[in-house]
Image (cartoon, grey):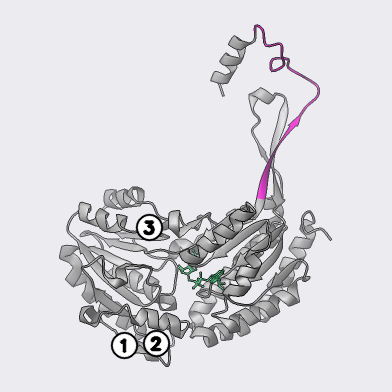
Amino acid sequence: MSYKTNIGYRKETLIKLLNTIILHEDEVIQALQNDFNKPIFEAVLTETNYVIADLKDTIKNLQRWAKPKKVLPSILNFPSTDSIYKEPYGKVLIIAPWNYPFQLALCPLISAVAAGNQVVLKPSELTPKTSEVIAKIILKSFDKNHVEVVEGGAEVSQGLLSQRWDYIFFTGSVAVGKIVAMAAAKNLTPVTLELGGKNPCIIDETANLKLAAKRIVWGKFINAGQTCIAPDYILIQKDMKTHFIEYLKVEITNAYGKNPSLSPDFARIVNTKNWLRLANLIDETKVIFGGQTDIENRYISPTLIDESDTDSLIMQEEIFGPILPILSYENETELSSVISKYEKPLALYVFSENKSFSKKIITQFSFGGGCINDTVVHFSNKRLPFGGVGHSGIGAYHGSLSFDVFSHEKGIVKKANWLDLTLRYAPYTGKLTLIKNILKWL
Ligand code: NAD
């Protein structure tokens, strides 16, 4: 069976995958809860139902996406018909992280299969229950030569990276992204690197502070802050800071109650190593809200930090947890100097009623993607490319773009034989002026 050409087979296996996921949906949700207490609502919204919707969309559009696309021919080739053929790369390696362990493993896999590739998936070892269910679902849905799950940690991952692949799709940290890029370079293997960064959340003096607080609290504390596009820090116009902090406190309490450790809607930190890393970032002298920690339950409450020092520990690297430093700026020069201090982030958010200010921010800084007057939600539109730039990643996916990521695009000119213009052939004597005139019109 050729996975390459047989679109019917690709579709058939994806339908089988869809049915298997639906059958095991409760098991996936339970596994996510067991791994790090992911709230059911979040598990359905950002994991199982997200994947099911992506799968349905892919099945529906597969035929259309796979078809050669006609493009306008060049006058130089007259008469011809020109097309782009989508060719599967071949053997694809997908390495997934733990924070959205089902979605970030399954969505690239779905597109890789749709595009006609063979796939090996390495899910994260930090969410072992979810990885186990993923392996079971894949085994039930695919022939092992077509799609296989290899479970394990960094060593297993490095073993896989030492092999030759036709495409590598990696989601994870910047540090491991560099290891992946180096391994891929040995065989000139193309890569997509979906990485992270320090995502700024800028608020100017015209912003609707109450609504901004509500949307930032949701985007920051969903999955207990363990989201690659969560706001990493707030940069607010100096005069608004005190007022805004009060709104943030109200919104955190509205969402998670007075004691968030009792809320069924607040996740835990994935493991002790990450808990220790995060607890170490909390400078008690700067805590203005929250700051409660419990190592046994890997709990860290939603925490607000009053930060003025861009060289402090918490401002060194991506936080990736429920701790939110709040910095302020007096003027645009100061704002710019803070943002420019860091590598290009995966996301940037600006809250403002001033259209020219938001536009200026969006165009002035380089970042993966983002929102004006909201956080995180750009992820949910399949018509928007999702990916980083610079240290936050290489390449982008989602929607039909995901199919293209896993396809090599072959440009083909189909030349007609009924006419053969002599202009391009030697001898060139007497043809220079004519070719110059034609080239002017291209
Ligand atoms: P990670 O880089 O530690 O691990 C990701 C994967 O790489 C795992 O499967 C892991 O087993 C493997 N791995 C770990 N060390 C390795 C090594 N030395 N060599 C080879 N493989 C190795 O990342 P994580 O902790 O799972 O995820 C958190 C990071 O991922 C954050 O930085 C976050 O911003 C980023 N992230 C990015 C996106 C995105 O779409 N851009 C989405 C989710 C998470």
Residue 314 visible in the current orientation? yes
- The quarter of the displayed image where residue 111 is located: bottom right
> Mark 1 Cα within 10 Å, few/some/many (few <14, many 20+)?
some
Q: Quadrant of the N terminus?
A: bottom right
Distance CA(mark 2)–CA(mark 1): 8 Å
Q: Is mark 1 within 8 Å of ligand 1?
A: no
Between label 2 and label 3, give the one nearer the viewer: 3
Mark 3 lies on residue: 343
Give the label on residue 292, or none: 1
Q: Position of residue 226 (x, y in %)?
A: 43, 74
Q: Is residue 423 magenta?
A: yes
Query: Disc 1 or 3, which lies upstream in sequence?
Result: 1
The one nearer the camera, 322 or 398, is 322
Q: Is residue 273 magenta?
A: no
Q: Which residues are magenta?
A: 408-430
Asked if marks 2 and 1 touch (Cβ < 8 Å), the reply is yes
- The quarter of the displayed image where residue 140 is located: bottom right
Asked if marks 1 and 3 touch (Cβ < 8 Å), the reply is no
> Mark 2 Cα within 10 Å, few/some/many (few <14, many 20+)?
many
The one nearer the camera, 414 or 341, is 341
Q: Secondary structure at mark 2?
A: strand
Task: Name the kind of residue labelled 2 in the image.
Answer: Tyr
Main SS, magenta region, reads loop
Residue drawn where x is 26% and y is 53% of the image: 336
Residue 55 visible in the current orientation? no
Q: Position of residue 79 (x, y in %)?
A: 72, 25
- The quarter of the displayed image where residue 189 is located: bottom right
Distance CA(mark 2)–CA(mark 3): 29 Å
Mark 2 lies on residue: 299
Q: Secondary structure at mark 3?
A: loop
Task: Name the kind of residue labelled 3 in the image.
Answer: Glu
249 above or below 241?
Answer: below
